[in-house]
Amino acid sequence: MFNKEYRVALMTIAHKEVRRFLRIWMQTLLPSVITTSLYFLIFGTLIGSRIGKMNGYDYMEFIVPGLILMTVISNAYANVVSSFYGTKFQHNIEEMLVAPIPPWVILTGYISGGVFRGLIVGLLVTLVSMFFADLQVANPVMMIVVFLLTGILFSTAGFINAVYAQSFDDISIVPTFVLTPLIYLGGVFYSIDMLPEFWQKLSMLNPVFYIINVFRYSILGESDISVLSGFVVILVFIVSLIWFSLRLLNKGVGIKN
């Protein structure tokens, strides 16, 4: 039941998370904008002019959706994994555990912070991309929906990483060795049609591939896969990770022991 106490607790956690990354915006928001601008300049303008068309679009236009979503993924993930692990490390998590609030309130509060950071950075990068490409959004509603779903998915993934992390080194292992390869092999810079058949089939196992293609469809109206199948994959992963996160909280894994 979503009573007043739960609502106050949820808003308190979410407000704390948002204030945390806004207070240090030069570390949390600005770097992604600068890095992505360099991607636009180097890959889009300099290299893209030599590549030419990709699936009927200028190379710059083709990579813009993937680069935008890349910042949403990395920022949503980083916000939750660093914040929740910091709460564990400083032993502030005990205050929430003894409070009369259910695990889903705690999880939703942290996810809200990650989603909001991913959304802000994504919108900033989208504005920057307009200086490099003639961006015409085919479906603005779908674009916002994918923004939110992506933020929820990778905020939850960051939460799971933080639960299992035993040191600050542990919160960088997954982004470095798992998340980054999935993003770069998810079709940000190329179309799946360019790959040999074996690698095309292997790409179908990459969840980021579906997310990027659905987002590309919302902007360009073009995708390497069925949009419906993309949304199904995204929702399946979200439900699975949220269910797993709640189990971890209920059992106190990495928190009570």
Image (cartoon, helix red, strand yellow):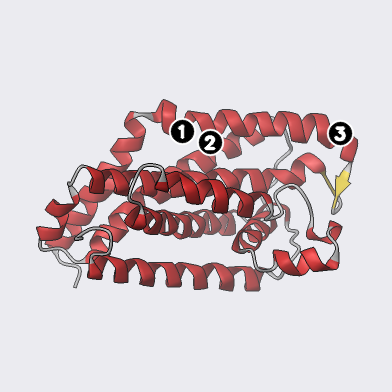
* Crowd around label 3: few <14 · some 14–19 · many ≥20 (10 Å): few
Q: Which mark is residue 29?
A: 1
What's the residue at 32%, 44% (across, down)?
83
Lower sequence index among marks 2 and 1? 1
- 204 versus 64 height, above or below: below
Tell me where residue 161 appears, x and y as whole percent. Answer: 40, 55
Q: Horizontally, is 156 left or right of 203 in the view?
A: left
Mark 2 Cα shell of 10 Å, populated few (<14), some (14-19), many (≥20):
some
Q: Is residue 182 visible?
A: yes
Measuring 51% from the left and 48% from the top, which residue is drawn there?
175
- Image check: 206 left or right of 244? right
**Left-right relation of 113 to 118:** left
The residue at which mark 3 appears reads as 49
Residue 62, position in %: x, y? 76, 47
Asked if the residue at tag 3 contacts the one at tag 2, i.e. Cβ–Cβ closer than 8 Å, the answer is: no
Query: What is the three-letter code of the residue carrying label 1?
Result: Leu
State the residue position of label 2: 124
Q: Is residue 6 above or below residue 50?
A: below
- Tell me whether circle 2 and circle 1 mark residues in contact (CB < 8 Å): yes
**Image quarter hosting the N terminus:** bottom left
Task: From the viewer's side, name the closer residue of 114 and 171.
Answer: 171
Q: Secondary structure at mark 1?
A: loop
Say if residue 116 shows up in the picture.
no
